[in-house]
Structures are given as structure tokens and as C-alpha cells.
Image (spheres, coloured by chain):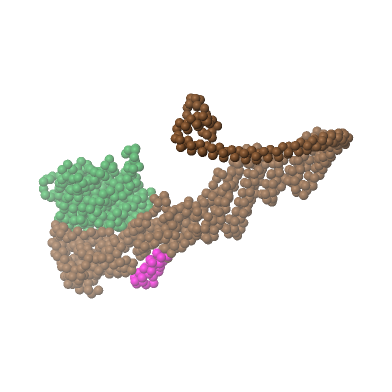
């Protein structure tokens, strides 16, 4: 089937940041940021997948301030995005990480590359050097959170200069640094989750206290986490021990499900937004796995039809293996417009847009 | 001839000269008519001759007969005179007889009176005798009772009972009857108390019951009492059996057989004699009662035996146990006929089977415990030498011995257990003839439960070490290797040996029969073992790889690559990696074969590679992604995460691949200055110099190191490489 073949989009530079354009629900669109140490050459690509023809169109925006390490898109405004980037400080010729909000200008679509319009730059210098990610609040447009070293900074971005409204600082021995962070949309306005080393922590933003923690979630570094979009308390994590684990936050002593199907670090784990049985994971062994975690999904399959449900209930495990990438895959994202569509990005600058195979789709329809 | 002819002609032939109907005229005419002259003349002479001979014959006959007749006449005359004399004598005899008769009649009429008197007297005598017996009866009964001769007493009483009843209304007899009844009542009481008393034997009880029955006590009541009493006695016996201290199981079984079982048998037989085989009672009801009674008691007994057997198994001398079971089984088979509807032999077999199964299970437990113990000791001995010396060779040297000793001791242990269980199969044992037992024991218990079960356990134990998030702290990695090797050893030889041994010793082939399907096949076990071994070795590679990865990651992450100084030496962590690899190599090398690697002289390949490196450097320095991609396209795609085989080279390759991949990932996360890049250059060159000898395909190492250096160049702000000659000098200086 033609449909099962991925569409390929190649970038000129290495890349390790990818985001679905969340606010756009009509068209399948992804944002990709490049990494080049010739800082002025960096770009943001807006790749659109034409589902009818199976073709790809793209718009390129200049991101000439530095190489993009992480990229998120606003849940409200399709044209707004945030990046964390590495740039050179002119004074001492040193590299620094910064984070900024950008708007993609609508004008002159024909141009080869349009510069991005900077909305604001976050002033993170005083809080640390390692700016990991800036995440938009899932519902409140005005809010964003930036993870810097051992701090989570909550900004009010409604005005021209972002105002720091709240700060969570984590003190521990050995100068802990967060590797990533994410809003917990299950506890909409009040929780932010961070990972440092092998531990995952949830922060209550009203009290600035730690709400929960999964100590030694992985035997090595935790790379990413994703909350189940539908089922409360369930979260998936992945890390350098080459496994994906799924946890119930009410009992964090042991994972509910462990899957160790990759052969190297797992960089990212993503729940499908509609069918939370489906999970994507990407690894530096160059393989992308579509797995089923039906056992801890929000809507067990048997509700779909009454008879023969026992036989239909799927076991947990790998559903599909995508090994078209030739380098490490650092990013994978589900499309916001088509729940069966997903994009993956490998370091060599290849963006693949895949659809869930029809045979698998049928099981969930 | 028809009847008409018969009538027409006279009977017989008139021409037959000798016949009665001979007609001379017809004959003459016929001859004259038919014959020639000569013939006639011949005939004549013939006839004349015949006539003459006949005539003379007749004369002789007449003469002889005449003489006889004359002598007969004489005799008759003499007889006539004799008879006359006899007639006279007979008359006299008749007269004498008449006189005798008259005499005898006169005598008997004289004696008539006396005789009547005598017979009357003798009648009176017997009556008096009986009366005397009756009068004496109470005292006799009493004396018999005193001596304890109850059966005699009862017999006497029964003799007189009818008479007493008949004449009971007479005053004099009334007294006797009352006396008798009183005595009898006493007798019955005594009998009752006797059979209720604890210390009298079953036989005595049965006698008493029999007597009571003869005295027409109600059978129902007696039966119930009898059973109650027997039961209480049996229960006492069982209790005595249960608590009697210090006896071994054989004594226990013997005691049970001689005490409990024989009593029960006796009760059953006497019950049958007394209550069942008498047509006037409700036979079926009675036998139902009996079988219920027997069954409840047997159940209790079985329970007790089961308990005892289980107790015995805890201390466990199998030979003794088997002997006891044999005796038990024999005894029960012998009394199998006790009641019709329950098959005690069957139940006994059941107990034996259960005992066998339990024995197997307890052995399985021992084996498991033994395995756990030996694993612990292996762990300890693995940990110990590390403390004393860092020398890898000593630690690894231990490994080979450890594996062999682990495997051997386990196999020996299993063998010992099998030997122990063989006792169950001695041909002279009674339950050996039970097919049910043999099948169940040999196939189900020994083969499936014990041997196969243990190997499954072994596999599961080995596999449990690979589990993530185990409660037990991560075992030393060498243990994983030892377990891998152990699984392989079992797979290749031990399983086959053990199964063959089992099949041979326990004749499994013979008894397989219809349960063949339930069998676990050898190949099935082997596949499982092999996959466990594969899991273990994968896990080993993974853990070892992650350990080295961790080292590399920390070293890359903590360094400030933007501000590093010009490299003067290889970073210490690289040396540590090499040391670790060397240790792993010796460790793995002790246990696994070298494995195959593509044939290539290492010398030449290293030269090729240095050229290769130069080419790749120029490629990278051009900074074109397209160029690298094209380069990748043309270079063979290298499978980085290929499955691990059971060979040294394959295992080491796996570890190195994971480690280098980690190195690559770490480098990609950093930004380098010129000197930072050069440090990486030195490090990769160093690795290149020493890593090739560990791996199957050195191209793989070269490829990964190229990638690392390439990524470093790509992540460098000022990508200027060091002179290769300088790099070489630095690396060789170590």
C-alpha cells in the first residue's frame, strides 16, 4: 500500500527538534529546527503534509540567532512558537543557551526564507546556563514555563517583556540539573513535571512543593516523559537504559508496564492523543517503535463491541517497527490534525511522515 | 410273489423233495417229462440211495429214544412212593405248630399287665429327670456364670425355655422361671458390661453379641451398640497409634495392620456372621450399616497413615518409607474384600501415589534449595577474589571451575535424587503391579514434576536475573556469564543425559501409553534453555555496555569542551575503558569460545583504516551534509545492534558497539572548541589502536569511531584537526 510508505523531507543540516503545530487542526503540519554551528544558517521549517496527494510542502523561516535545541508550538496560535537555542556570546566567544518566543510572519509566502519575528526573549541568564525547554501552558495562552538548570520559571507572556510570575527551584546535592520538563495537563493549572538524572518529579505550582517523585525511574538518565492524555495519573517515561516505562503516579515504587525493545537510549515517548493505547518511542538505535499499552489505556478495547471482546483485547507490545532512519532518531510527534499521522526526525536531517498502518488502525476503529 | 398267486398255488414247492408240500406224482411226471432216460435212471439210483440212508438214520434214532423213555418211566415210579412219605411228615408238623401258637397266646396274656406298668414307670422317670434339670437350672446357670461359661449357660437356658414358657402358669414352675429370668437378666447384663468394657478383645465381644442374639435381644439395638463399641475401640487404637512415641514408620504400619486393621476385619466378619447372613434380618440395611462403618473407620485410618507418611517424608529415609508403604499396601490389598462397594486397595494405591508425588515434590524443593545455595556460593566466590586482587585473571579463572562445579553438582544432585526415588520401583514391591501407580509415579511425578520441573525452575531462575527492577540487587555481571554458560551446558549435554537416565531408570517409554501427549519434549526444554541463555547473554552485553556507557557519558558531560587545553595525552577515562574491556575479555574468554571473525591480517587492515580515516576527515571538513550522506550511502550499512552469539568476539563486539554508540551520542550533545575536538581525535585514535582486537569486524569499530570524530567536527566551532603524526605520537607515548 502506498499509504504505508513514509513521505520524506530532507534538511540540509542536522536537526534534533520537532513539534507538531498544535493549534492547527485542519492540516497536518510540523515544525523542525536545525542545528548548525554556523549560527546564522539555522532555520525553522514548517512542513505541511498534503494527505490527498501524499506530497509535502514547506515554508522556511530564518532562525539566525543560533542552533535550535528544542522547539514547542503554541496551543492557541498556530503561528507562535518557542525555541531554545545555542548561540555565541560575542563578549567572550562562549556558547550560551537562550530561549525566545517567535511568530511566523504570514506575509510573502513565496519567498525562499522569511525571517522569524521575535516576540520576546526570556531573560534566563541569572537562573542558569542550561536552558532546556520552554513549554506553553496547555490552556492558558499567557503562560509559559522554561526549564533552566535546577529551576522552572513560569512566565507571563501577555506583555512585550515576559514577566516572571513564579519560580520553582530544586536544591539537592551534586547540583542537580533538569534535563527536561513538561506541563501536567492532567492537573491543568497546577503541576509541572521535570526530570533530572534518573528521577522524575512533579511540582505543585501553588505551593512550590514537590507533589510526587519517581526515584530511579530508569537505571540511567531519563530522557523524556509524556502524560497519558486521557487517563489520570498515568505517565510514560523513557531513558538511557533503553526502556520505556509506564507509571501510575499513585504508586511510584514500580512501573506498571516496562518495555525494553530498543537497543540504545530511548529519546522520546509519545502517547497518541486520541487512542492512548498507542505509544511511539524513538531511539538512537535509529528505530521508531509503535507500541500498544492497551492494558493501562483509558478505554479498554472491549467497550467497542460487546461480543468477542476477550479475543480482541490486544496484548501489550510492539505493533510496528519503523527502521527507515539511518541515524539516531531524536524526535517523534503525533500530528495535531490527523491522529493517525506522525512525524519523526533523525539527526541526519531527515523528516519522515508516517501513518499508522491500516491493519493496526482497523483494530482501534 | 403276489397274494393271488399265493392263494392259487399251495404254499411251498411241490417239487421240493425235502419240503412238506412234496407231491410225488407231480414230481415223477415232471422228471419223466423233462429228463432224459439217463437222467431218470440217475435220479432213481439217487433217490433209492437217499431213501436207504434215511431209513437207517431213522432206525438209530428210534432205538436211542426208546432206551431213554424206559429209564424215565422207572424214575417216575420211584418218585411216586417218596411223595407219599413226605405228605405224612407235613401233617405232623402242622399239628405241632398249632400247639405252639396256643401256648404263646396264653403266655402273652399272662404278661400283659406287667409290661404296661413298666412303660409307665419309665415315662415317669424321664419326666422326673427333666423336672430335676429344671429345678437344678438356676443353680447350674449360676455356677456356669460364675465360671464364665456363658455359652453353656445360654444353651441350657434355651433348652428349657420352651418348657418353662409352656408351664409357666404352674406355681412351682413359676418360681423356677422367675429365678431363671433373673439369672438370665444378670447374665445379659454381664454380657453387656463385658462387651462394653474396654479391655476385652474383639473376639470376646463378638461372642457376647452372639449369645445375646441367641437370647433374642433386638438385633438393631445390638448392632448399633456393637458398632459404637467397636468404633470407640478402634478410635482408641488409632489414637494410640498416633501418639505412640519413637516408633519408625514400619513399626507404625505393622502396628496398624496387626491392631487396627485386624480388629476391623474381625468386626466386619463377625458382624456379617451375626447380623447379615441371617435371613430374618434386613440384610441390606445391615450390610449398608457395616460398609458405612468400615468406610468411616478406614477413612480415619487412611487419614492417619497419610499424616504419618507425610511426617516421615519430612525426616525422610526413602527406603524405610517405601518398605512401610509396601507393607501397608499389601495389607490393604489383602483385606480388600471387606466390603463390596469400596475399593480399599485402590485407596491404598492412591495413598502410595500421593506419597510418591510428595516425595518427588519434596525432592524438587531440595533441588531448588540446592540450586539457590550453589548460586549464592558462586556469587560469594565471585565477589571474594575481587576484594583481594584486582587481577582479572584470578576472578575469571574461578569462573570455569565454578560453571563446571555448578553444573556437575546440580546434575549429581538430581542423579542422587533419582537414585533415591528408584527405591519406589523395586520389583518385589506389591504396588509395582498397579499400573496406575507406575504410570503416575514414573511419568507424572518423576519425569514431569521432578526432572522437567526442575529444569524449568533452573531456566526461570536464570532468567530472573535478567528481569528489570528486580528486588534483588543487580548481580555481578560475571554471574550472568556463568548462568549463560550453565544454561548452554544443560542444553547441550545435561538435559539429554538426565532425561535419558530418567527414562531408563523409570522405564518411562514403557509406561507412557496414552499420556504421551502430556510429555515435555527434550527439544522443547532445550529451546527454552537456549532462549534463556540468549536472554542472559543479551542482558550481560547490555549491562556491561551500559556500565561502560555510563563511564563515557559522565566523562563527556562533565568536561568543559569549549575551554579545554591542547591535548597532551589520552584522557584517563579511555584507559579505564580499555582496562574494563581487557577484564571483560578475560572473563568472557574463560567461558566462551573465541568465535569467528573475518579473515584479514590485522596489520594491513589498520593501514587501510588510517587511509580511510584521512579520507573521512577531508569529507567531514567539507562540512557538507550531502557529502556525508553520500559517503554513508556508499559505505555498507553497518548493523550496529546485531544479535549476540555465544562467542567471545560476539559478546565483546556487542559491548563495544553499545559503548561507542553512547560516546557518539554524548559527543553530539556538546559543542567543541578546537582543542576539544583534538582531544576527541586523540581519544578516538587511541580506541582505534586497541579496540580492533576485541571485535569480529573491525570495520564496525572504524565506522563508529569515524562517526564520533565526524560528529565532533560537526559540533566544533573551529574545526581544525591535529596532525595525524602528532596524534600517533601522543597515543604511542602511553
Q: Which chain is brown?
A: B
Would residue B442 appear left or right of A287 to someone viewing this image?
A: right
Q: Which of A150 and B538 is in front in this view?
A: B538
Q: Nearer the viewer, residue A265 or B272?
A: B272
At 73% from the left and 39% from the top, the residue drawn is B75
Q: Which secondary structure dominates the residues rendered in magenta?
A: helix
At 58% from the left and 50% from the top, the residue drawn is B335
Q: Give the range drawn in magenta.
A: B380-409
Give the number of marks. Answer: 0
Q: The green chain is which one?
A: A
Q: Quadrant of residue B122?
A: top right
At 19% from the left and 54% from the top, the residue drawn is A15
Q: Name the spot of residue B446 as percent of width and height, x first.
A: 45, 56
Residue lying furthest right: B110
**Quick check: is B109 in the magenta stretch?**
no
Q: Name the spot of residue B345 as percent of width and height, x first.
A: 54, 50
Q: Nearer the viewer, residue B302 or B269?
A: B269
At 20% from the left and 56% from the top, the residue drawn is A326
Above or below, comparing residue B488 to residue B341 in the picture? below
Q: Quadrant of residue B617?
A: bottom left
Q: In which quarter of the image is the C terminus of chain B?
A: bottom left
Residue lying furthest bottom: B733
Q: Which of A21 and B272 is in front in this view?
A: B272
Q: Name the spot of residue B275 as percent of width and height, x first.
A: 64, 41
Q: Name the spot of residue A208 as percent of width and height, x first.
A: 34, 51
Q: Using the rendered image of the protein, determine whether residue B474 is visible from the camera's viewpoint.
A: no
Q: Using the rendered image of the protein, determine whether residue B249 is visible from the camera's viewpoint.
A: yes
**Quick check: is B401 in the magenta stretch?**
yes
Would residue B3 appear left or right of B267 to someone viewing this image?
A: left
Amino acid at each position: 500500500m502506498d499509504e504505508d510508505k513514509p513521505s520524506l523531507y530532507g534538511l540540509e543540516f542536522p536537526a534534533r527538534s520537532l513539534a507538531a503545530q498544535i493549534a492547527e487542526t485542519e492540516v497536518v503540519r510540523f515544525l523542525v529546527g536545525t542545528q548548525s554551528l554556523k549560527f546564522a544558517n539555522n532555520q525553522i521549517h514548517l512542513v505541511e503534509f498534503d494527505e490527498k496527494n501524499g506530497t509535502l510542502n514547506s515554508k522556511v523561516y530564518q532562525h539566525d540567532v543560533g542552533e535550535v535545541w528544542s522547539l514547542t508550538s503554541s496551543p492557541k496560535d498556530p503561528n507562535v512558537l518557542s525555541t531554545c537555542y545555542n548561540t555565541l556570546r560575542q563578549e567572550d566567544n562562549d556558547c550560551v543557551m537562550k530561549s525566545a518566543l517567535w511568530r511566523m510572519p504570514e506575509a510573502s509566502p513565496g519567498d525562499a526564507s522569511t525571517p522569524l519575528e521575535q516576540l520576546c526573549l526570556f531573560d534566563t541568564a541569572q537562573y542558569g546556563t542550561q536552558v532546556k525547554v520552554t513549554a506553553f501552558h496547555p490552556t492558558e495562552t499567557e503562560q509559559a514555563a522554561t526549564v533552566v538548570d535546577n529551576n522552572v520559571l513560569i512566565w507571563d507572556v501577555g506583555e512585550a517583556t515576559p514577566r516572571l510570575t513564579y519560580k520553582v527551584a530544586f536544591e539537592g546535592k551534586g547540583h542537580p540539573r533538569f534535563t527536561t520538563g513538561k506541563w501536567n495537563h492532567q492537573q491543568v493549572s497546577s503541576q509541572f513535571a521535570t526530570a533530572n538524572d534518573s528521577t522524575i518529579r512533579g511540582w505543585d505550582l501553588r505551593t512550590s512543593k514537590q507533589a510526587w517523585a519517581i526515584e530511579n525511574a530508569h537505571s540511567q538518565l531519563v530522557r523524556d516523559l509524556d502524560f497519558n492524555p486521557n487517563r489520570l495519573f498515568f505517565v510514560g517515561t523513557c531513558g538511557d537504559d533503553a526502556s520505556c516505562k509506564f507509571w501510575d503516579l499513585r504508586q511510584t515504587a514500580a512501573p506498571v508496564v516496562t518495555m525494553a525493545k530498543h537497543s540504545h537510549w530511548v529519546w522520546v515517548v509519545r502517547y497518541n492523543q486520541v487512542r492512548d493505547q498507542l505509544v511511539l518511542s524513538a531511539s538512537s538505535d535509529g528505530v521508531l517503535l509503535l507500541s500498544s499499552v492497551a492494558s493501562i489505556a483509558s478505554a479498554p478495547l472491549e467497550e467497542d463491541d460487546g461480543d468477542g471482546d476477550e479475543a480482541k483485547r490486544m496484548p501489550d507490545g510492539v505493533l510496528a517497527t519503523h527502521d527507515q532512519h539511518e541515524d539516531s532518531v531524536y524526535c517523534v510527534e503525533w500530528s495535531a490534525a490527523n491522529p493517525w499521522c506522525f512525524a519523526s526526525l533523525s539527526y541526519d536531517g531527515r523528516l519522515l511522515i508516517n501513518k499508522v498502518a491500516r491493519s493496526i488502525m482497523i483494530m482501534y476503529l | 410273489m403276489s397274494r393271488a398267486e399265493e392263494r392259487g398255488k399251495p404254499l411251498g414247492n411241490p417239487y421240493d423233495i425235502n419240503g412238506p408240500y412234496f407231491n410225488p406224482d407231480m414230481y415223477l411226471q415232471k422228471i419223466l417229462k423233462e429228463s432224459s432216460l439217463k437222467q431218470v435212471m440217475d435220479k432213481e439210483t439217487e433217490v433209492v440211495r437217499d431213501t436207504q440212508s434215511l431209513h437207517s438214520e431213522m432206525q438209530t434214532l428210534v432205538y436211542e429214544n426208546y432206551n431213554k423213555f424206559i429209564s424215565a418211566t422207572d424214575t417216575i415210579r420211584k418218585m411216586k412212593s417218596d411223595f407219599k412219605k413226605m405228605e405224612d411228615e407235613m401233617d405232623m408238623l402242622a399239628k405241632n405248630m398249632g400247639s405252639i401258637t396256643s401256648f404263646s397266646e396264653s403266655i402273652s396274656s399272662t404278661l400283659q399287665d406287667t409290661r404296661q406298668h413298666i412303660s409307665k414307670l419309665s415315662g415317669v422317670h424321664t419326666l422326673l429327670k427333666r423336672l430335676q434339670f429344671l429345678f437344678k437350672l438356676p443353680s447350674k446357670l449360676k455356677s456356669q456364670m460364675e465360671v464364665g461359661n456363658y455359652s453353656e449357660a445360654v444353651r441350657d437356658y434355651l433348652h428349657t425355655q420352651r418348657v418353662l414358657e409352656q408351664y409357666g402358669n404352674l406355681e412351682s414352675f413359676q418360681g423356677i422361671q422367675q429365678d431363671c429370668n433373673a439369672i438370665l437378666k444378670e447374665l445379659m447384663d454381664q454380657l453387656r458390661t463385658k462387651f462394653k468394657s474396654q479391655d476385652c478383645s474383639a473376639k470376646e465381644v463378638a461372642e457376647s453379641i452372639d449369645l445375646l442374639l441367641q437370647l433374642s435381644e433386638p438385633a438393631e439395638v445390638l448392632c448399633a451398640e456393637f458398632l459404637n463399641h467397636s468404633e470407640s475401640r478402634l478410635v482408641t487404637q488409632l489414637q494410640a497409634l498416633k501418639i505412640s512415641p519413637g516408633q519408625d514408620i514400619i513399626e507404625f504400619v505393622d502396628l496398624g495392620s496387626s491392631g487396627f486393621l485386624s480388629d476391623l476385619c474381625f468386626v466386619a466378619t463377625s458382624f456379617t456372621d451375626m447380623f447379615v447372613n441371617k435371613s430374618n434380618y434386613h440384610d441390606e440395611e445391615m450390610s449398608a450399616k457395616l460398609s458405612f462403618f468400615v468406610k468411616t473407620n478406614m477413612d480415619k485410618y487412611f487419614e492417619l497413615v497419610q499424616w504419618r507418611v507425610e511426617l516421615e517424608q519430612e525426616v525422610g529415609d526413602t527406603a524405610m518409607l517405601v518398605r512401610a508403604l509396601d507393607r501397608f499396601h499389601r495389607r490393604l490389598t489383602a483385606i480388600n474384600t471387606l466390603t463390596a462397594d469400596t475399593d480399599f486397595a485402590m485407596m491404598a494405591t492412591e495413598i502410595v501415589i500421593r506419597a510418591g508425588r510428595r516425595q518427588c515434590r519434596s525432592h524438587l524443593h531440595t533441588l531448588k534449595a540446592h540450586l539457590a545455595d550453589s548460586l549464592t556460593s558462586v556469587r560469594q566466590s565471585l565477589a571474594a577474589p575481587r576484594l583481594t586482587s584486582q587481577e582479572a585473571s584470578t576472578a575469571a579463572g574461578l569462573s570455569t571451575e565454578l560453571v563446571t562445579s555448578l553444573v556437575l553438582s546440580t546434575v549429581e544432585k538430581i542423579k542422587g535424587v533419582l537414585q533415591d526415588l528408584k527405591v519406589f520401583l523395586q520389583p518385589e514391591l506389591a504396588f509395582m503391579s498397579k499400573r496406575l501407580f507406575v504410570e503416575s509415579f514414573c511419568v507424572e511425578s518423576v519425569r514431569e514434576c521432578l526432572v522437567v520441573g526442575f529444569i524449568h525452575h533452573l531456566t526461570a531462575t536464570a532468567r530472573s536475573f535478567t528481569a528489570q527492577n528486580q528486588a534483588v540487587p543487580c548481580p555481578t555481571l560475571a554471574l550472568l556469564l556463568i548462568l549463560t554458560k550453565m544454561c548452554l551446558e544443560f542444553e547441550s549435554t545435561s538435559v539429554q543425559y538426565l532425561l535419558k537416565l530418567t527414562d531408563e531408570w523409570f522405564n518411562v517409554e514403557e509406561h507412557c501409553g496414552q499420556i504421551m501427549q502430556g510429555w515435555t519434549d527434550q527439544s522443547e526444554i532445550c529451546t527454552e534453555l537456549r532462549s534463556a541463555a540468549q536472554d542472559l547473554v543479551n542482558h550481560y552485553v547490555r549491562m556491561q555496555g551500559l556500565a561502560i556507557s555510563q563511564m563515557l557519558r559522565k566523562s563527556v558531560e562533565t568536561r568543559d569542551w569549549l575551554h579545554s587545553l591542547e591535548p597532551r595525552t589520552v584522557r584517563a577515562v579511555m584507559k579505564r575503558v580499555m582496562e574494563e574491556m581487557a577484564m571483560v575479555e578475560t572473563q568472557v574468554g574463560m567461558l566462551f569460545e573465541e568465535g569467528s571473525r573475518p579473515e584479514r591480517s590485522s596489520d594491513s587492515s589498520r593501514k587501510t583504516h588510517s587511509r580511510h580515516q584521512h579520507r573521512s576527515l577531508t569529507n567531514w571538513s567539507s562540512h557538507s551534509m550531502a557529502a556525508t550522506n553520500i559517503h554513508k550511502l556508499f559505505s555498507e550499512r553497518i548493523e550496529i545492534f546485531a544479535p549476540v552469539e555465544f562467542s567471545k568476539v560476539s559478546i565483546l563486539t556487542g559491548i563495544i558497539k553499545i559503548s561507542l554508540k553512547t560516546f557518539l551520542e554524548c559527543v553530539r550533545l556538546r559543542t567543541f572548541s578546537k582543542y576539544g575536538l583534538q582531544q576527541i581525535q586523540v581519544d578516538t585514535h587511541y580506541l582505534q589502536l586497541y579496540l580492533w582486537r576485541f571485535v569480529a569486524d573491525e570495520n564496525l569499530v572504524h565506522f563508529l569511531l569515524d562517526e564520533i570524530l565526524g560528529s565532533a567536527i560537526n559540533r566544533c566551532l573551529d574545526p581544525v584537526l591535529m596532525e595525524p603524526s602528532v596524534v600517533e605520537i601522543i597515543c604511542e607515548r602511553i
